[in-house]
Image: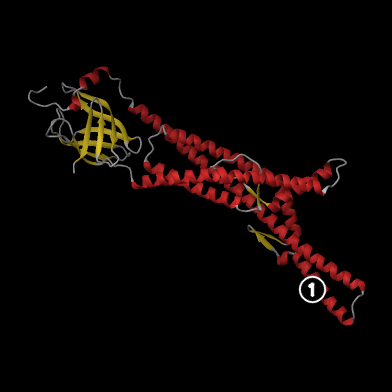
């Protein structure tokens, strides 16, 4: 130690640190972090795949709902047109009309029969989700197929939703192990926010639409259930009931039994909707608000440590450093004014750190022992909320302030 030179607190415990401290496992921590980040990337890739599969299932169910609604509408028109033809035919057979009325009745009957045929042919055809149907018969066949597939689609949807929840939970667990930069966290939060906003819109559409029913299943605030149109639901139950009539010996058709089954599912659907209204929608709103606040904070930017800093060591002639970001996204500090520091020269690297979270950085201080031997010391920086001060903790606790 040189006489009359004030040794800054930066070196007070350097000898002791060199003697008893275990080597700081920075490389090990970084390796674990990089491994965690690699697994996060893999989970996000898989999550995107599962999300797309789930969306495909929802689209298939939407198609089934469209076909069910269209078939019901055309069938209702067909019944009405058929009843009109039957009424006119009965009137003609009754003979209760004069010659003038007979000609007029024939014209009306011809028009009604043509109208009935046009309805059977869907007024020239109807396109649903890119596929053209030329008759009610084709629609009914397609509906029968979709009704058979609907329950499996519902099961597939919930299985995929469960996979997605598991992946999200695993991703969140790994985040704490990784040195994740704000940019990545921000994008993840934005993706989550978009998914939740879409989810809550679906939930609100379902609870506000009496013609959308829900099959009982597992779901939570991260995944809206898969709705079925009233028409598709009735088609599913009716087809299942008639299948029982064909396969169960001695079973007779009972309209009241079928109606009771439909009411049972309606009541179950209403119960699920109450859960959605009372629990899922509020949970979605709460999560959306939390994400919006977090995104707003991240977009505003966390304190940036780059720039000129004064090391408050000693009582005067303070050392000055400049912190810059390197190509790897880490930060390095170089001495621009040695001040009271022993053994350092201008331009020497004082430390290198990596971001741990919004305000915390970990890394290594490149210092010297009291007799001038180089030593590496574990370092942690904690930045104030306004980004003007840094708590500097290596073998001693110091404070850094902005140069201006």
Left/right placement of residue 303 relative to residue 99 reads: left
Residue tagged 1:
111
In the rendered image, residue 151, in percent from the top left (x then y), is placed at 68, 44
Q: Secondary structure at mark 1?
A: helix
Question: Can you say whether 54 is above or below 231 in the image?
Answer: above
In percent of the image, x 68 and y 62: which residue is there?
A: 126
Quadrant housing the C terminus:
top left
Q: Is residue 149 visible?
A: no
In the displayed structure image, the side of residue 145 where residue 372 appears, left or right: left
Q: How many marks?
A: 1
* Nearer-the-camera pick, 27 or 262: 262
Residue 349 sits in which quadrant? top left
Near-viewer residue (203 or 237): 203
- Residue 252: horizontal and vertical position, in percent? 86, 45
Please determine whether, in this image, residue 122 is positioned above or below residue 378: below
Q: Quadrant of the N terminus?
A: top left
Q: Residue at the spot x=52%, y=45% of the render?
A: 282
Closest to the observer, 48 or 216: 216
Q: Nearer the viewer, residue 75 or 97?
A: 97
Residue lying at the far left in this picture: please name it.
4
Q: How is the image coloured?
A: secondary structure
x and y percentages locating residue 138 in the rendered image: 74, 57
Indicate left or right for 278 with 216 as reference.
Answer: left
> Is residue 128 at least partly visible in the picture?
yes
Residue, x 88% and y 69% (percent of image)?
Answer: 90
Residue 329 figure quarter: top left
Could you say where residue 16 lies in the image, as x and y percent from the top left? 22, 19
């Amino acid at each position: 130690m040189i006489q009359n030179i004030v040794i800054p607190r930066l070196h007070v415990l350097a000898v002791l640190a060199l003697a008893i401290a275990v080597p700081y496992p920075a490389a090990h921590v970084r390796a674990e972090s990089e491994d965690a980040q690699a697994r996060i990337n893999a989970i996000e890739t898989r999550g995107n795949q599962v999300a797309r599969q789930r969306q495909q299932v929802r689209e298939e169910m939407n198609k089934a709902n469209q076909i069910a609604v269209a078939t019901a509408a055309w069938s209702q028109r067909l019944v009405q047109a058929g009843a009109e033809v039957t009424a006119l035919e009965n009137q003609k057979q009754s003979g209760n009309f004069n010659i003038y009325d007979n000609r007029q009745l024939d014209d009306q009957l011809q028009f009604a029969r043509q109208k009935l045929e046009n309805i059977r042919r869907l007024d020239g055809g109807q396109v649903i989700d890119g596929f053209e149907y030329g008759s009610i018969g084709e629609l009914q066949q397609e509906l029968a197929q979709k009704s058979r597939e609907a329950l499996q689609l519902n099961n597939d949807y919930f299985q995929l939703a469960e996979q997605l929840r598991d992946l999200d939970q695993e991703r969140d667990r790994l985040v704490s192990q990784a040195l994740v930069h704000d940019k990545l966290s921000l994008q993840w939060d934005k993706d989550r926010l978009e998914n939740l906003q879409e989810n809550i819109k679906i939930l609100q559409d379902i609870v506000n639409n009496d013609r959308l029913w829900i099959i009982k299943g597992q779901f939570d605030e991260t995944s809206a259930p898969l709705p079925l149109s009233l028409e598709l639901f009735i088609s599913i139950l009716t087809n299942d009931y008639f299948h029982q009539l064909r396969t169960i010996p001695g079973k007779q058709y009972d309209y009241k039994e079928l109606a009771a089954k439909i009411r049972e599912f309606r009541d179950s659907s209403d119960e699920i909707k109450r859960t959605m209204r009372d629990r899922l929608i509020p949970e979605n709103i709460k999560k959306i608000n939390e994400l919006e606040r977090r995104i707003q904070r991240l977009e505003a930017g966390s304190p940036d440590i780059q720039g000129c800093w004064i090391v408050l060591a000693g009582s005067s002639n303070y050392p000055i450093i400049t912190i810059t970001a390197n190509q790897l996204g880490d930060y390095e500090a170089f001495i621009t004014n040695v001040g009271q520091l022993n053994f350092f020269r201008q331009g020497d690297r004082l430390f290198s750190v990596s971001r741990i979270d919004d305000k915390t950085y970990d890394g290594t201080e490149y210092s010297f022992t009291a007799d001038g031997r180089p030593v590496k010391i574990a370092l942690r920086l904690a930045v104030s909320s306004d980004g003007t001060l840094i708590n500097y903790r290596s073998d001693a606790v110091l404070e850094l302030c902005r140069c201006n």
